């Protein structure tokens, strides 16, 4: 087995997916992951193992016993009935069994063979009755017998199989459930409206072709009443949302786009009823059904969501649900919210520190990549404060809590009012602005025209309804959903995922862009490595490369890439002390790489030619190398800027005010001044609160801010800004709450994204102008009574369709021009 | 001409039953997960069959 490192699209032999950076080769076959390797091996008779193992179990087998014990203790909190109640969906008795169903989120589901493994899990576990995987949502729904197996048992079974369930008590189940059922509703409504529209149009064909007088009167009556029958569900069921939201708008004294829509639909329906019942005329049920159908289609177009992405996370989603507290030497797990200052907590390898605490005893290396995007773990010694949000690497440590979770350095941010604001508007601001004046104007014209004709009541009513029918703001109501929906789709194709389609408008309105540095401008995975110290011979370099090849630590990988040699040796006695370093012996030489404490007992590094004042910094982020117990030197790491990021900044700097807010020191200031307009827009050493407040300060000057960040420390600024974009290497992984998630690899297109959002707004304005022109002409003719309502009813659907077609083609064309 | 009335009534009943079928399919959640069933169909039912695969 050997690991290669290429990005050329290698296809996995087992699952057929594109292997990303790392893949395994067996017998000239490429396999993308350990699961696939296992499954593949099973499929070859010679190496197949008879026991029914599941595909990800290799992960666990390779790990040490400590890890297994850790994971099992970790789930102890699931025995708590209160917590169980929050997680379990349904509970009932059926056939003498305590049938319980639970839905768990399993981020580990990533290749198709996982579906087979997880859905067959009931075969080996008698308590589990059935399981069903939702692949894209990375969820599993399990039905189990709670008298045979407990919830904890289920989670253990899954974890042993290599699929660790992510339990999040604060997950907004209600919201996601509601959106699912409203999506179902929308499908049904579109189905019903489409059905009725089609049939009404078929029944109206004779009317279209033979003009006013249909030959057979019985047929005509039959068709007309059938039309009424078909129009009833459209009016009362399909368009009910518009009436409801129009009514709630009136109650709150807000004029929204739904009011003129409802008026138009009602006018069409009532007028048609009147015509059919009293005069046996054709009516305009076809126009009404068509309008409702297109409106609903627009809604569907706009409701595109990326189900596997979560835009609404707050810190609680990342923090553990419970934590182990040591009280009188007894370990017990309590919910993190109940932590009090003074509690002693136990944090195991790879767990997140839930509250600001002081470290006892051992050293710890804390990975703050979660918080700041900084990928190099920081070394902490006894007595130092570890801030909440850091991930502990190394053997278990004891901590004393000094602040409660909600008062911790990072999480206090969430008490800021910025997190309470809720800006969800269905339609865009522009539409609402236009429709406000539009509605008032239409009503005024309709009333004025009716008054003008008043002595002639029949004519007055005629004119009044015709005006309402003609003016029905189909273009207003259709343009934005179709334009934004299409734009969102085009962005999604370019791996830039918007929370909802109205973000397009916010992007277009931005005039100031704020960047975070670490993890946003820089790539947290790709580091620049430099070596300081005694020059190494080629043979020694090859030995170092052999050593780091055995370790999966991110820094080892970077050193591995840094050393250019193809020679390898046999490594013996390889040892990895988590959070400290690695060692092995090659050809009788003892090699050690790791933190300074791991290499030498005395942390005074003066003997390798380093200045004293530099030492402290060097200790925390540098990796030292010793061969046969003599220190050779150290590797230091610096974040690399993302490919093409400077070009993006140059592109943007002419059009927007650019600012940099970095939590780091100002060592990069010189370098960055070139790209940002002036020094005053570069701010360093910013705390999360300062970032948030700076955004507020910019906003108070009337700026509309786009914030681009990545870590939890940007969460406040992302939330406060008008639009917050998170950059992520792996979009399904981690992102604080935001309006859009951009995949890092596509970020060089960002300038184009901004241009495209603005041209989408222009397209919308053009189509508003077109429909305005149509309305002016139509209203003039309607108000003067020249138009018969029939002509108005025919013109209206034509206008709607032409607007939909124009907007869709124009956005696609403009995307093509920008090569998106 | 009354045959047209009969034909249209029959056709409406047929079309209506398709509409009901559609509503049923939406309500039973057949549009919720459009990806996993495509994977599930390709998976072998039993372990023994799995081992025969090369």
Image: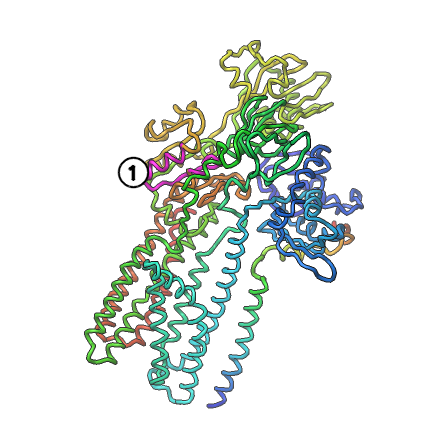
Whether residue A710 appears in magenta in the rendering, the answer is yes
Whether residue A635 appears in magenta in the rendering, the answer is no
Relative image position of residue A369 (x, y in whole percent): 53, 32
- The local crowd at label 1, few if under 14, some if 14 to 19, many if 20 or more residues have their Cα within 10 Å, is few
Circle 1 chain: A
Q: Quick check: A286 left or right of A602?
A: left
- A157 above or below A680? below
Q: Is residue A152 visible?
A: yes
- Residue A668 versus residue A186: which sits nearer the camera? A186
Question: What segment is highlighted magenta in the picture?
Answer: A690-716
Q: For the point 33% across and 85% down, which residue is it?
A: A279
Q: Is residue A16 visible?
A: no
Relative image position of residue A378 (x, y in whole percent): 55, 25
- Residue A76 versus residue A29: which sits nearer the camera? A76
Which quadrant is home to the N terminus of chain A? top right
Q: Mark 1: which secondary structure?
A: loop
- A168 above or below A672? below
- Residue A232 versus residue A249: which sits nearer the camera? A249
The extreme front residue here reads: A328
The extreme top residue here reads: A607
Q: Which residue bears the numbered disc 1? A: A701
- A281 above or below B36? below
Q: Quick check: A738 left or right of A531?
A: left
Relative image position of residue A368 (x, y in whole percent): 53, 31
Colour option used: rainbow
Q: Quadrant of residue A227?
A: bottom left
- Residue A40 versus residue A418: which sits nearer the camera? A418
């Amino acid at each position: 087995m050997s690991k290669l490192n290429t990005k050329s699209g290698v296809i996995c032999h087992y699952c057929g997916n594109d292997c990303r950076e790392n893949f395994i080769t067996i017998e000239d076959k490429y396999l993308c992951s350990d699961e696939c390797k296992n499954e593949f091996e099973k499929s070859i008779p010679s190496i197949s193992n008879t026991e029914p193992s599941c595909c990800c179990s290799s992960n666990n087998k390779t790990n040490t016993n400590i890890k297994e014990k850790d994971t099992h203790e970790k789930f102890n909190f699931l025995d708590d009935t209160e917590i169980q109640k929050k997680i379990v969906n349904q509970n009932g008795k059926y056939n003498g069994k305590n049938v319980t169903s639970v839905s768990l989120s399993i981020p580990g589901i990533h290749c198709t063979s996982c579906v087979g493994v997880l859905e067959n899990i009931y075969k080996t576990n008698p308590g589990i009755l059935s399981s069903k995987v939702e692949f894209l949502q990375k969820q599993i729904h399990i039905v189990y017998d709670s008298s045979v197996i407990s919830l904890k048992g289920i989670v253990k079974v899954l974890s042993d199989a290599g699929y660790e369930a992510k339990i999040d008590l604060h997950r907004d189940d209600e919201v996601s459930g509601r959106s699912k059922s409203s999506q179902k509703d929308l499908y049904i409504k579109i189905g019903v409206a489409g059905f009725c529209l089609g049939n009404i149009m078929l029944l109206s064909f004779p009317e279209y072709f033979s003009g006013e007088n249909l030959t057979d009167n019985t047929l005509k009556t039959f068709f007309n009443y059938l039309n009424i029958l078909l129009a009833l569900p459209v009016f009362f069921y399909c368009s009910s949302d518009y009436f409801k939201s129009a009514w709630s708008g009136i109650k709150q004294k807000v004029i929204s786009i739904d009011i003129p829509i409802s008026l138009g639909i009602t006018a069409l329906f009532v007028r048609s009823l009147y015509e059919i019942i009293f005069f046996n005329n054709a009516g305009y049920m076809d126009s009404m059904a068509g309008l409702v159908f297109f409106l609903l289609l627009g809604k569907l177009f706009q409701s595109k969501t990326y189900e596997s992405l979560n835009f609404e996370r707050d810190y609680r989603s990342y923090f553990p649900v419970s934590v182990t507290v040591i009280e009188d030497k007894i370990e017990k797990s309590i919910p993190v919210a109940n932590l009090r200052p003074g509690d002693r907590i136990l944090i195991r390898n790879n767990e997140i520190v839930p509250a600001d605490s002081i470290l006892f005893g051992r050293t710890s290396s804390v990975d703050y990549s979660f918080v700041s995007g900084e990928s190099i773990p920081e070394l902490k010694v006894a007595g130092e404060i570890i801030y909440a949000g850091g991930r502990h690497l190394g053997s278990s440590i004891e901590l004393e809590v000094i602040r409660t979770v909600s008062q911790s350095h990072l999480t206090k941010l969430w008490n800021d009012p910025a997190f309470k604001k809720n800006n969800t508007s269905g339609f865009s601001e522009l539409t609402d602005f236009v429709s406000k004046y539009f509605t008032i104007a239409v009503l005024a014209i309709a009333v004025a025209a009716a008054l003008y004709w008043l002595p002639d009541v029949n004519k007055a009513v005629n004119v009044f309804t015709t005006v309402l029918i003609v003016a029905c703001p189909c273009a207003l109501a259709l343009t934005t959903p179709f334009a934004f929906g299409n734009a969102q789709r085009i962005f999604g194709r370019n791996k830039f995922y918007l929370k909802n389609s109205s973000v397009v408008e916010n992007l277009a309105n931005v005039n100031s862009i704020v960047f975070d540095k670490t993890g946003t401008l820089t790539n947290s995975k790709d580091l620049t490595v430099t070596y300081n110290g005694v020059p190494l011979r080629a043979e020694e370099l090859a030995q170092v490369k052999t050593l780091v090849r055995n370790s999966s630590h991110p820094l080892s990988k970077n050193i591995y890439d840094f050393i250019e040699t193809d020679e390898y040796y046999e490594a013996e006695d390889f040892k990895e002390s988590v959070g400290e370093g690695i060692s092995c012996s090659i050809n009788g030489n003892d090699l050690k790489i790791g933190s300074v404490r791991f290499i030498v007992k005395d942390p005074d590094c003066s003997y390798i030619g380093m200045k004293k004042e530099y030492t402290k910094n060097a200790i925390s982020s540098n990796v030292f190398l010793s061969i046969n117990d003599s220190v050779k030197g150290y590797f230091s790491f610096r974040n690399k800027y993302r490919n093409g990021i400077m070009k993006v900044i140059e592109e943007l700097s002419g059009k927007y005010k650019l600012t940099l807010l970095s939590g780091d020191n100002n060592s990069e200031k010189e370098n960055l001044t070139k790209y940002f307009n002036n020094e005053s827009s570069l701010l360093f050493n910013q705390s999360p609160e300062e970032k948030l407040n700076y955004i507020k300060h910019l906003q108070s000057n009337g700026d509309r801010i786009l914030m681009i960040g990545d870590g939890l420390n940007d969460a406040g600024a992302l939330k406060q800004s008008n639009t917050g974009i998170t950059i992520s290497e792996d979009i399904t992984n981690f992102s604080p709450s935001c309006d859009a998630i951009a995949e890092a690899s596509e970020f060089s297109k960002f300038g184009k994204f901004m241009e495209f959002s603005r041209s989408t707004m222009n397209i919308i304005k053009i189509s508003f102008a077109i429909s305005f022109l149509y309305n002016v002409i139509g209203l003039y003719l309607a108000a003067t009574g020249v138009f018969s309502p029939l002509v108005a009813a025919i013109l209206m659907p034509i206008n709607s369709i032409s607007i939909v077609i124009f907007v869709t083609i124009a956005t696609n064309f403009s995307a093509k021009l920008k090569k998106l | 001409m009354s045959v047209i009335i009969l034909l249209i009534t029959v056709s409406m009943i047929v079309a209506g039953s398709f509409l009901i079928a559609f509503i049923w399919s939406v309500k039973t959640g057949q549009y919720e997960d459009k990806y996993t069933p495509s994977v599930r169909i390709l998976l072998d039912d039993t372990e023994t069959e799995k081992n025969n695969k090369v």
